[in-house]
Amino acid sequence: MRVFALATLLIGLPATAFADGGFDIVIPGRPGVPIIINGIDASYAVVEGTWGLGKNVQVQPTIYGGRYIGERQPSDVGHYYPTLGLQPGYGRLEVEPPANRKLPQPAESYYRSWGAQSAPLPPQMDIPTDPPPVILAPEINVNPPRRRLPPHAEGPARPPK
């Protein structure tokens, strides 16, 4: 039984390896929105060679039945690009006023400031009527003063040089 299962597995593996080499029919997800591949409208067309994404290899697909879409100008999409030298399709009309016109009255002055400060301290509390007992700790001198030895206990005198 195990030999039969192993043989079935080995026969089925090569078939799955070649299953990705076929063709695809491209159907748009939304009506009226074209699927464009490399400048070609591939909506309802047959595309062959799209296996590059699955195998980490980029392949130029072959499209059967698609139609070429010319280079679209960026202004066609509703955006304004000043480098094209074209007028924007919409927007406000800029009118430069004459230099000798009557100026409007100046606006009133406006001033605003911000600041930050700490919260006020709480009031000092009175001493409680029953304070906790005070415990006196013994004083421990860590560095006691050194006692000087009497002159006769310092050791033998050195001869002068």
Image (cartoon, rainbow, N blue to C red):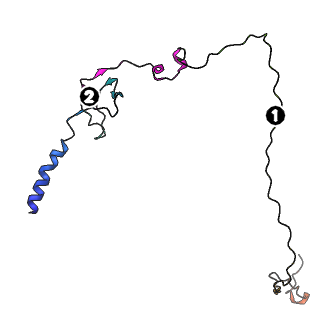
Which residue corresponds to the image point at 80% horizontal and 19% vertical from the top-left? 104
Query: Relative to 25, does residue 158 appear above or below in the rendering?
Result: below
Residue of label 2: 44
Magenta residues (range)? 58-86
**Is residue 99 found left or right of 95 in the rendered image?**
right
Query: Relative to 126, does residue 71 appear above or below in the rendering?
Result: above
Q: Secondary structure at mark 1?
A: loop
Residue of label 1: 110
Please check the rendered image and state whether residue 145 is part of the magenta-colored stretch, yes or no: no
Q: Secondary structure at mark 2?
A: loop
Quadrant where the N terminus sits is bottom left
Please check the rendered image and state whether residue 73 is part of the magenta-colored stretch, yes or no: yes
- Residue flagged by tag 2: what amino acid is it? Tyr
Quadrant where the C terminus sits is bottom right
First along the sequence among labels 2 and 1: 2
**Is residue 36 found left or right of 12 in the rendered image?**
right
The percent position of residue 125, horizontal first and vertical second, equals: 85, 73
- Residue flagged by tag 1: what amino acid is it? Tyr
Which residue corresponds to the image point at 45% horizontal and 20% vertical from the top-left? 76
**Is residue 8 found left or right of 154 in the rendered image?**
left
**Is residue 70 found left or right of 102 in the rendered image?**
left
Q: Quadrant of residue 139?
A: bottom right
